[in-house]
Structure formats: structure tokens, C-alpha cells
Amino acid sequence: MTGTAAHIVRTLLLSLITLFGVSVLIFLMLRVLPGDPARVLAGLNASEEQVSRLREQLGLDESLLAQYWQFITGVLTGDLGESARTSRPVTAEIAVRLPATLILAVVATVIGSIVGVTAGVIAAVRRNSLLDHAISSVAMMGVSMPVYWLGLLLILLFAVTLGWLPAAGSGEPLSIVLPAVTLAAFSTALISRMTRASMLEVMGQDYIRTAEAKGAAPRTVIIKHGLRNAFIPILTVISLQFGALLGGAVLTETVFGWPGIGRLLVDSIAARDFAVVQGIVLVYATAFILLNVIVDVLYVVVDPRIRY
């Protein structure tokens, strides 16, 4: 087994331990939340007998250990339980909503990567120029601006005032523009700042000056010799941001009424639908772990000098 393969196997084993820890943590956190899930689901007009019957149906009258054992054994067999609100399997609920979140996160990642890397390279090449200061200022605003505030601002400008784009929903292709731009704002700024810093470090190396002395075209020096060698930290940020965008979609989907698992998570927390919340958190954790494994493999592809 090669060093890289052994590293991936070791990472996957550690990931299983991490997933187990996440499952315990989210299980306990949901149980200490205030409010009785059976009372919330039964409604304000339900009698105590009806609430007790519902509590028994949901298994909430059993011990915490028994509830967790039922949950974790179900997870190991691919059964995440049943939604208390809709009585449908949690896997079916997530399967219906997950594509919308993935589409939104992928579009936001593409926007953030293209705009962020381009802006970062331009800022590094034009260091200390007016353009560099402008890009750095906009990037600072993007990092500092709350997602929900930016989303409301974009709705007010492009949907309410100008009427160019839909304010909410996913009924037409243009519906994804505002939520994707909102979701991409932070990652675009972060990728831009990381690209600028990495490019400035690389462009000061001897091999860059050697390439310039040999008469290589500026575009070749910047892209082939500069950006390629500066790409590993940028790749790390992009991959981690994709995972963060999946989690960050919770606020964005709520603001824009986007029918993804982020909005489903918010609705399920409000309704104390434990099974759905646990399932979605496990999906998020699994996505983060898989992204880290993929990034480890891509490191070796981008820079063959890396060995584990």
C-alpha cells in the first residue's frame, strides 16, 4: 500500500470516529433543547393523553441510551428514522431537498472560485496600485458582511426596486442568481485574499525571476509558474468553503425560500423533529469529511512532490 493510500485509509478510520462523536453530540444537544417535542407536534389543543401517546410512539419515553442505540443502529443500516411531522423516512425527505442545496452550493463555489482567484491574481500582479486597494477593500467588505443582511439588501435592490430578478422560490432559472451571489460573497472575498497572499509569496521566488530573465511571456509567468505553485493553499480554501457553503446555505435558503436541506433543517428544529435534524447534521458532517479526503488526493495531483 502506498503512502497516499495508507494516509487515506487512516483518514477514513479517523473520520468514522469523528462521525460517531458528531452523532453523540447532536443527539444529546437535541435532548437538552427546551420544549417537549411531543407537545409541539401534537398542537396546543391536544390533551395530555394524546401527548403521552405521541411521546410513546416517538420513543421519547425510553431512556437516552435506548433512544441513542435505536438511532445509531438505524444509521448503520442506512435507516435515519422517520420524520415526526410528515411520517416519511428521513432519507426520503433529505433526498428530495439535497439536490437543491447541492446546486446552490456548486453555483456559489464556481462564482467564488472564478471571481476570487481572478481578483486575487490581479491584486497581486498590480500590488499597491489603486486597483489592488479597491479589490482588497471590496474583499474586506465581503468577509465582514453578514449573509442574511446582504441577502435582504439584494432582494430590496434587484427584486423590489428594479424588478429584474425573483425575490424567492425556485420556480424559474433566474431564481438561483440572488441566493447564489449571496452565498458566494464570503467565499469570494476569502479566496481573493488567499490568492493575493499566495501569489505575492510565489512571485518573489527565484524561479519566477529566472523565468522572466529567460524572456517568458508575462501571462506564462503568472499562470504557469506563479498561479500553479500558489494553488495548494487556494485549493484548500476552495474545498473547505464548499463544505462551509453547504452549512451556510441554512441562512441563505431561509432568506430566499430556497427548498434545500438548510431550510428543511430550520423547519425541523422549530418543530422539534429530532430524526430529520440528526439526519441532516450527519449528512453535513459526512460531506465535510469526504471533502477533506478528496483534497488530500488532489494535493498529490497538483504537486507531485507531496508524499504522505
Image (cartoon, helix red, strand yellow):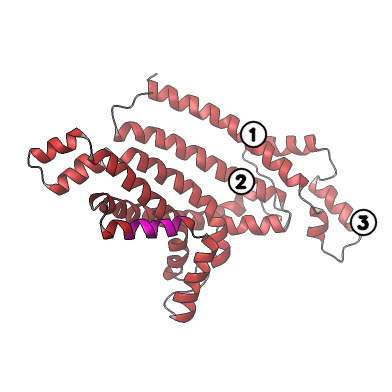
Q: Main secondary structure of the magenta part?
A: helix
* Nearer to us in this view, 173 or 135: 135
Asked whether, in this view, residue 92 is left or right of residue 273, the answer is left
Which label sits on residue 21?
1
* 291 in magenta: no
Q: Name the residue under label 2.
A: 281
For label 3, the crowd category at 10 Å Cα-Cα, with few meaning under 14, some 14 to 19 and many 20 or more, is few
Q: What secondary structure is found at the residue carrying circle 3?
A: helix
Q: What secondary structure is found at the residue carrying circle 2?
A: helix
Tell me if residue 38 comes above or below residue 70 in the rendering: below
Q: How far apart are marks 1 and 3 (CA)?
A: 36 Å
Tell me if residue 280 comes above or below residue 300 in the rendering: below
For label 1, the crowd category at 10 Å Cα-Cα, with few meaning under 14, some 14 to 19 and many 20 or more, is few
> What span is colored magenta in the figure?
134-143
Q: Distance between the residues labelled 2 and 1?
A: 12 Å
* 137 in magenta: yes
Q: How far apart are marks 2 and 3 (CA)?
A: 32 Å
Q: Are marks 2 and 1 in contact (CB under 8 Å)?
A: no
Q: What secondary structure is found at the residue carrying circle 1?
A: helix
Q: Mark 3 points at which residue?
A: 49
